[in-house]
Structures are given as structure tokens and as C-alpha cells.
Amino acid sequence: MSSAQIEIQLIASIVAVACAIPGTFLVLRKMAMISDAISHSILPGIVIGFFITQDLNSPLLILLAALTGIITVVLVEYIQKTGLVKEDTAIGLVFPALFSIGVIMIAKNANDVHLDVDAVLLGELAFAPFDRLLIAGTDVGPKSLWVVGVILLITITLLILFFKELKVSTFDKGLAASLGFSPAIIHYGLMSVSSVTTVGAFDAVGAILVVALMIAPAATAYLLTTDLKKMLALAICFGIFSAIFGYWVAHWLDASIAGSITTVLGLVFLLVYLFAPSKGIIAVMYREKQQQTEVSLLTFLLHLKNHDELEERHVNHLNEHINWQKVRAKTVLDLAQKNNMIHIEKNIVSLTKKGDEFTSKAIDYIITNEDAQIEDMKDDFFLFRG
Amino acid sequence: MDITEYIELVFTDYTLRTITLGTAILGAVTGMLGSFAVLRKQSLLGDAISHAALPGIAIAFLITGAKDSNTLLLGALVSGLVGTFWIRGIITKTHLKSDTALGLILSLFFGFGMLLLTFIQKQPNANQAGLDKYLFGQAATLVESDVWMMAIVTGLCLIVMLTFWKEFKILLFDADYTKTLGFNTKIIDILITTFIVLAIVLGLQTVGVVLMSAMLLAPAAAARQWTNSLSVMVFLAAIFGAFSGVFGTAISASQNNLSTGPVIVLVAAVFVVFSFIFSPSRGLLFKQIRFIKNRRDLELHKTLAFMHHIAETHEDISHPHAIKLLNNFQGYTKNTLRKLVEKDYVQLQGNMWSLTKVGFETAANLYTKQITEDE
């Protein structure tokens, strides 16, 4: 590995961490699309900043662009407050307009601006190590490394200082307000951090992929845990893993680094989405199937309890009567038998004592309709689940 | 170049005519379908779909190796649909919310698309140039066959929309009721979504991935301000969209270095701002005017009530009182007094005022009967 390669991976990892932290909160606050809006609408800010400073890494440019990001948030909230359109429409109206202004400003000054829309949107990490920061003539590393490093440092400091406030205001705005810290300040604080991070990172990974780095690790982590600290840690891990692994994929395919980092993020998300222990698609589908069988079982037991007549309880009669297909009827019958809820004598099904007790409780549950109760009941009575 | 000259040019110049027609049709169809997206609260779906279409374009190119725009758009359509249904899967099957799902699919698909595009660019012998026009769109690359394609899709879209108008409408406003009526909501839903994806994909070549969502939203959001009827809204949105296309093309054609996509979006944004401000029933301007008017009415009533309060203490209700008495009172201004006189509630004699009989009665009934019919 050459030193340039190490530097690229270092920058990518730092960007990933710097994005994952505000991203986690954005996902939890259901404001993920705001990051998309910010990442687009900072373009005019960047262009104006670039006119003034002629340097993509200058702090002034980052501040200006971050300001545009906050203006976007304020505009979106203003439009939302008028009640003329819904929130998501407000987002969708504001950022393309600002982005268009940015594109037009670049196009009109194409001759004197060394700035390319492609570069802003997509970034190019491969060139990052060539832009060195010189302090008193000594080379102290690539400029963007310093920029994202400082941003990460600020983000982490703010996170540690205001962790409690962030946590409370994310999960319970009312409580936060009544405890005395203004949700508005925390909201705009988070928006500012997101804007600054977006601007700082766009140079490295491009505006659209910043969104990926913000949302994807957080969303993936959210599928695995419901603990905020664990979620943050997981998001950071996913971010760093994708950054480094993505770099090598890009190296191998000779393609865009940012693109392959995102692709790796996507693959990680896909894997977790499918296989996450309790919230993955497969787990959810399995659980749904289980619940379906258990509900059928309940229906079946109720039917038994309601009918004393022998012909109503004959095994063959059941699938005709409750209108189940053979396979399903058999699954339910087996499950009931395994759990000692019924016993079958000469093809006549009847409830056992345990089955009877369960059914009575189930009727109670149906009348009171408390969701939590049924799961406890199932835990108490079931030896085997559906 | 003045306007008449430009209009003449639109009819005579092949390129300009094609582009104007293309953007107009595009604006109309996206406006039409955008109305449904906006009302279904799926405004940002357009943004996600347009980004999600990118890998489809790249894959279609990788498979066929041809740059035929119809094949590429087919790829875009497929990957847009995959993205849409994945978004739906994430929302229904996990506890991730719709904004996260949208942002996720948007950025992940786009990133994957970028990976493929850069990969294609590095391939030897590929005539890949021009694939990146789908990023920002280049209306200038529209040819007559593209316009025909758009026209056909728009026609198809119109036919389907008119046939299933009732179903679309009822699903839009009351999904549960639709289900109880026995309609297959899933199929109607898929039909609408598919057409929205189709419209987005059509626009990619003209305005590009990034700005496509605005084409979908802006005309519909503008049209929404003028009406509460779905059919009028769809119609207006189509007109706004078409005009955005035509004006946008005209403005970008009359200047150097102006790409069409962003200009169209800005024109559409102007429509939105105009509608937000000047729409008679919902617009901010008239809302403010109504607000001020209401406040004035309230002040008038307050003054009248105050006068009534004073007059009550006298046996003779028309006993004159000094105007000075009113000075400390908030609701009182010279204007309100004049208005009260105009309405014959109050009589003025020099520095004195007195309630008339009508005025006294109105004031007495002000709060009991809550008479608000006067302006």
C-alpha cells in the first residue's frame, strides 16, 4: 500500500464516521430526506464561496455552504408552516430550485470557474491526496484530511457534550422542552452539524453519496439494535468497513471510489435487511407465518370449545367445516397436539384441560383486546411455537 | 432576439421545435401524474425513483452495448420499479420509516449506478460517451423519435387515467373505503406507481436524474393551490408543466451556456411561488388580507361593545359621550368610528358620540347571538 492509498482510506473512514454520527440522529428523527435536500442545495453556497475564495477547502466556503444548508431547512420549515403543501413536498420543492440556481451559476461562469457539477455531485477521492496542506513550507498531509478531521472532532465533541440532550429530544420532544432545553436549538444544531459535515465531505465523496454515508449505516444499525449507543457504534463500524472495503473494490474494478463505497454500503444493508435476527425480512416473514398458524390454532380451539356435538369435532369434518386446506388443517392439528391442548380419540377431537384453560383465557383476551397479553399467554402455554 | 422572431423560429427550426415540443409534453405528463404523487404524500418518491433509475441505464448499456435511448430507458424503468418496490418492502416489513427508506434507496442505487458508469467509462472500445447526460439531462439531445415516444406514453397514460379515473380518485382519498367496495387496491396502486415511474424515466434524458423530482412536484404543488377538485388540479398541473417546459426551453435557448433542465425547474418554481402567494383561496397574500380584515372587524366590534358598555349605564341610550372616553381603548381608531357612523350605529355631534338604536341593539346582541355577517 502506498502512502496515497493509506491517506485515501483514512479520509474515507473519517468521512464515514463524521457522517454516521449525525446520520443516526437524522434517521431516528425521521428527517433522513433533509440530508438529501441539504446535500443538493448547498451547491449555490459552494459556488458563491468558490467565487470568493477560489479554494474548495477554504473554511469560508464551508461556512457559506453550511449556511445555505441551514437556509434550506428554514425554507422547508417555512413552506411547511404555511400549510399549503405537505412537508415532503416542501423538501422536494426547495432543493431542486436551489440546486438549479447553483448549476446555472456554474454554467454562466464556466469560463472563469474551475468547478464542475460532476465533481460537486460525485466527488473524487482519488485526487484528494494530491492537494496538500503546507504549513510554513512543511507538508502536513492532504488538505481534505485536515478538513474532515476537524469536522469529525467538532462532531464528536458536540456529541459527547450534548448526548443526553440529543437523546431526550430525539425520543421525546415534549419531555425535552419541559426539562428546559429547547428542542429548536438542538434541531438547528443538528442541522448545522449535518450541513457542515455534508459540505466537508462532498469534496471527498460527492453530495449524493454523503447521503448514503449518512443514512445507510444508521438504517442498517437500526435494524440490529434499539439501543442508541449501540446503534451509533454499529453505524460507525459499518461506515468504516464500507469505506475501506469499498476502496479496495474500486481499486480492483478501476471505478469510482465513492460509487463502490456506496455499493458496499448497499450490500451490507441488503444482508442485514434480509438476515437481521428479529427485524430482518426473513425473521419478520417467519414470525408472520408463525402468528398466522397460532391464530388458526386459536380459532380451532374456540371452535372445539363451542361445539360438544361429536360430528362437529370429527377430524375429517374439520377441514370442511372451518374451510381450511388439508395441509394447514394438519399443521394446526399437529401443533395443538404437540402442545397438549387436544387429544384425539377415534378421530374425535376434544380439548384437554390445558387446552380448555388456554381457550378461556383467549376469550378473555379477545374481549379485552390487549396486545401484550396474548404473547405472555403463548409463552405460558406453548411448548412449541407455530 | 425578440419574441415574435423566437416563436417563428420554434416553428421553423427542427431542433428548437423538437425540444420545445418534447419539454412541453414532458411537463404535461409529469404534471398530471405528479398530482397523484403529491396527493398520495409520495412527493419524494419521484426523487428516489429518478436516482434509482441510474443503475438500470448502466446495466442496459452493459448488456446491449448500444446507446439506443429506448433500451436504456427500459433499463431505467426496470430499476426504477425495483427501487420503488424495495422502498415499499422496507416501509411495510421493517420499522424503518419512509424517509429513511427513500433516502436509502436513492443514495444506494445512485452510488451503484455511479460505480457502473465509471466502470463502463474505463472499458476499452465502449462508445460510452453520453451516458452521463442522464445525470443532468440534455434537452438538446432530444430527437423526433424521443418526442414520439413521449407522446405515445402520454397518450397511453391519458387513456388509462380516464378509464380508471373513478378508481384512482377513490383510492387517493379513501383507501379503506375502496377496499370495502371490492376494488383490488393493490393493482390500482401498482398501476399509478408504474405510470409515475414511467413519467420519471421519460424525463431523465431531458432534465436528468437530479432535477426530475421537481418536474413531478412543482406543477402539481402549484396547481393544488388553485383548486380543490382533482380533475381541475390534474388539468392545471399539466398546463403548468407544459408552460414550464416551453418557457424554460425559450429562456435557455435565448442565452448562452444555459442548460435546459435547471431553467425549466426554475420556471416551474416561479409558478409555485406565484401560486403560493396569489392563489385566491389558499394564497399567502389573500390569507394575510383576510387576516387583517378579520382583525379590523374584531376591533370594530370591540369598540362597539365598549360603547355599549358605556351607554348601558345611562337611561337614555343615545345620551352623548365624549370621544375622549374612547381614547384609552385599544380597539378604537378614527377609522373604526367612521365605519360605525357609516353603518348608522353611531351618531357624531362635534366631540361627542352617541349610540343609535340600531347600534345599541347590534352591540347588545354581539356576543349573545354572535352576529358576524357584517363585513
Image: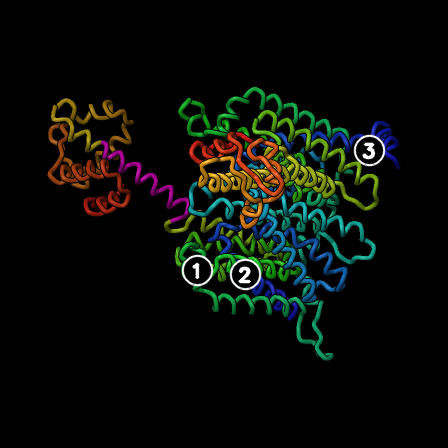
Residue appearing at x 84%, y 40% in the figure: B254
Q: Nearer the viewer, residue A155 or A164?
A: A164
Relative height, residue B300 to residue B124 (above, below): above
Relative height, residue A266 to residue A335 (above, below): below
Q: Find out whether the residues at labels 1 and 3 contact each other: C-beta distance under 8 Å.
A: no
Disc 3 target residue:
B15
Residue appearing at x 57%, y 43% in the figure: A82
Distance from the alpha carbon under mark 2 to that under mark 1 = 13 Å
Q: In this image, A322 relative to B296: left or right? A: left
Q: In this image, B261 relative to B51: left or right? A: right
Q: Chain of mark 2?
A: A
Reply yes or no: does residue A293 show up in magenta.
Answer: yes
Q: Percent x, y for residue A97?
A: 67, 45
Magenta part of the chain: A279-299
Q: Percent x, y for residue A170?
A: 45, 56
Q: Chain of mark 1?
A: A
Q: Nearer the viewer, residue B43 or A345?
A: B43
Q: Nearer the viewer, mark 1 or mark 3?
A: 1
Relative height, residue B87 to residue A124 (above, below): above
Distance from the alpha carbon under mark 2 to that under mark 3 = 50 Å
Q: Identify the disc placed on residue A189.
A: 2
N-term mark: 2 or 1: 1
> Identity of the amino acid at label 1?
Lys
Reply yes or no: does residue B152 show up in magenta.
Answer: no
Disc 1 target residue:
A167
Q: In this image, A342 relative to A253: left or right? A: left
- Quadrant containing the C terminus of chain A is top left
Q: Determine which quarter of the picture holds residue B140.
A: top right
Q: Nearer the viewer, residue A320 or B236?
A: B236
